[in-house]
Amino acid sequence: MASNLDYLDPNLIPLEEKVKAYLEAEEDLRKATVEARSLPTTEAAEAQAAEQFDQRPATGSFDQHEDEVEQRLQNLREVLAELRQDVLALLPVRDEFVKVNLGYGPSRVGAFSVGGSSSQDYELRIVH
């Protein structure tokens, strides 16, 4: 019975917080990717609406939205990679799951070797 409550161990709180931050960053990256993919459609609709009103952009101005979206994607990828490394560093074991509390019962997080046993590359797996 006690093993079922291992995920409530206070020593796992830093790991739980990093995993939650990782999942939030993953969701933000997903949303930003959708925004980047729909950008051409949005820009076409805006251009069509602007044509109806015969408006011209101010002299010397240029559209920065595409650059901002691309920069945001790059920043989110960097944050996600950093959080991934932090989670891997906090995991007490490799090649097996650790039970953590993500707020709705026991979830599992683990780092599993990729390719072969001599490889130092690990895949992060989160089951929630």
Image: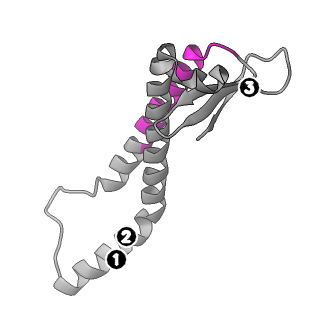
**Residue span colored magenta:** 73-93
Q: Nearer the viewer, residue 78 or 46?
A: 78
* Element on which disc 1 rests: helix
The picture places residue 117, in percent across and down from the top left corner, at 85, 17
Location of the N terminus (image quadrant) = top right
Q: Colour scheme used in the picture?
A: one colour
Q: Is residue 84 above or below residue 59?
A: above
Residue 95 is left or right of residue 2, and the answer is right
The picture places residue 8, in percent across and down from the top left corner, at 51, 23
Q: Write the residue at 66% across / 26% down.
A: 110
Report, in whole angstroms, how far the alpha carbon at label 3 lies from the one at label 2: 40 Å
Q: Nearer the viewer, residue 28 or 97?
A: 97
According to the picture, the residue beneath numbered tag 1 turns out to be 45
Earlier-in-chain disc, 3 versus 2? 2
Earlier-in-chain disc, 1 versus 3? 1
* Element on which disc 3 rests: strand
Say which quarter of the image contains residue 43: bottom left
> Dot 3, how many residues are within 10 Å of its Cα: few (below 14), some (14-19), or many (20+)?
some
Q: Nearer the viewer, mark 1 or mark 3?
A: 3
Q: Is residue 83 magenta?
A: yes
* Element on which disc 2 rests: helix
The picture places residue 127, in percent across and down from the top left corner, at 63, 39
Q: Write the residue at 13% across / 63% down.
A: 58
User: Magenta span: helix, strand or loop, mainly?
Assistant: helix
According to the picture, the residue beneath numbered tag 2 turns out to be 42
According to the picture, the residue beneath numbered tag 3 turns out to be 112
Location of the C terminus (image quadrant) = top right
Q: State if disc 2 and disc 1 touch (CB < 8 Å).
A: yes
Q: Is residue 45 magenta?
A: no
